[in-house]
Image (tube, rainbow, N blue to C red):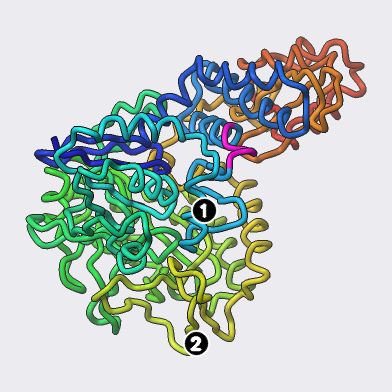
Amino acid sequence: MKCLVLPPHRDVTLVPEAPDGWHCVDVARDFYRRVFAADEVEAAAKKREDSPATAQSMRELLLLRSAQSLWAREGSSRHTALRAQGAVLTAISGPPCGVHLRLDDVALDGGTTERSVDVLRAMDLPAAYADDLTRAVEQLAGAEHVRLWLERDLQLPAAAWLARACPAQVPLEVAGPFAAQHREVLARLPVFQRAVFVDAAPLRWRVTTDVRSHEPSRLVWIPEGLQLQRGGRDRGLPADSHDGASGGLPRGDRGGRGPADPVHGAPGTFVPEAVRGFTGGDRWAGHVSLESLLHPDALVDSGCEVAIVGFCAFSDASWLDPLGGRVAHASLAQGTRRLRDAGVRVVAEWWLGAPGVDEAALDATFDALDREPWFDHVAGVRPFHWTRAPAGAERPFLWRDVRLGAPPEDRDLARSLPFEHARAIPESRLPQVLTGLANRLLARAPLSPGRVAAACLPDGTPTWNADARPRAIVLDADCALVQLPASLDGAPRPSWYATNLRTGGVLAMDARLAPALSRLTRPREVASVLGAVPEAQREKLVDTLVARAVLMRVNG
């Protein structure tokens, strides 16, 4: 038996299709199914309730109970379920764990996945998925062959542990996009020295619509940076995609060449049959270049259902894409209109920190998004990085007057290169700008819960009939009210809190009001819910709770 081993922590919303002749040992999926099971979440919550209260244990308990509440709520949307899932991962991977999990990221105690010495050290730190790794190794003892699949750097601590624990008599291979990008460094690490690094066709993934059961949907996922050849006979190798440039491709007449994106063969040539070769003709969702929207009929013909694009800025004449290319307003509007008419959803990611894009340009871009629905959904913001080109590829970036540097010497697995540009936002200020702009976008509409595939699909959030004078109130779709046995600072007194997993806000609640509000999952008249509150104070209280994303005003 040949075993294809998929370590955690990867996109929790994707289910792989095992290649012919391979048995898939999906450790990541096994881990997610275990920790998101109702009895496992309840056990994690009870453990914290029954232990001496600390600030950490109470914050973790708040996350776990909030997730349970939102999962149990009738009509809970896909995005709400994903936010609850992220809350569980955060809660179960706190100290003493040394690998801290988020829905779409990991953090290492005192280190980074861009530094191999930190990855090796993280192998022996406590991790929430440690038992799942041990169980996986038991399946490998009788294997004919083991191939570790490295999709992203987030999997490195678990992958290194599995490589070290793989039975010595079993041949070991390493493959996948991240392994192909960084094989020279990885091959020198002690845990991978006996492994053979192989080029292999990229896996085909399907998006799951139920994040806890992981039953796949009909949609095939096109990863960021996937290179497909004409006709789909050779699926190619994806470039490294973590926090890097979009898989888009400049046209031949824009000056510059690079690896093909999912809907192009050679630069400037649109090849929808390459996508059909990869998807088997099924409908798909995934990443395309901004310029691909200028070819709406080809996207539709290829089976596209959700197209995800990146942009950096809006100017008087064009949109700036993450490669430094420009797309004219009129052409983009025409393409997105045709896609919308055909039922294709266009989701945009805003990349901040690109060369030549200062804060004034970001303000102008925000205003443009407010004036006109250029995209069906703006998923959120992400930092721009000058991605290191994969071996053998010519860099596709088109900016001029950029001064490139080298990563710090100890970051031997660096995903990007430092750069300088006269009009770029200083790196030290970028986190503040990112947070500020994300909050401004959040005030317009909900952002996606993370950079995972299912977050790009339509949300399905229940909508209540609203008018200029709403007469009823209901709990915000992403807010839960939870009673804890102690306060969030660990003081031993029962306390109620409202927490919104979309905004991250936490509000201490009056114990006389909280029980009634916690049951407010259907619209009710204000007076029937808050009758104990003096009428003169009632509207002010509702205004405060609406502003804090605890309640919504609706026309019930």
Helix, strand or loop under label 2: strand
Q: As shown in the figure, which amino acid type bears the numbered disc 1?
A: Arg
On the image, the x and y values in percent for residue 322 come to: 42, 69
489 left or right of 457?
Answer: right
When the figure is inspected, residue 64 is found, relative to residue 241, above or below; the finding is above
Secondary structure of the magenta portion, mostly? loop
Q: Does 206 lie within the magenta span?
A: no
Q: Name the residue under label 2.
A: 403
Task: Specify whether residue 335 is in view.
Answer: no
Mark closest to the chain's N terminus, 2 or 1? 1
Q: Do the residues labelled 2 and 1 touch (CB within 8 Å)?
A: no
Q: Give the range drawn in magenta.
A: 92-97
Numbered disc in front, either 2 or 1: 1
190 left or right of 202?
Answer: right
Which quarter of the image is occupied by the N terminus? Answer: top left
Q: Name the residue under label 1.
A: 121
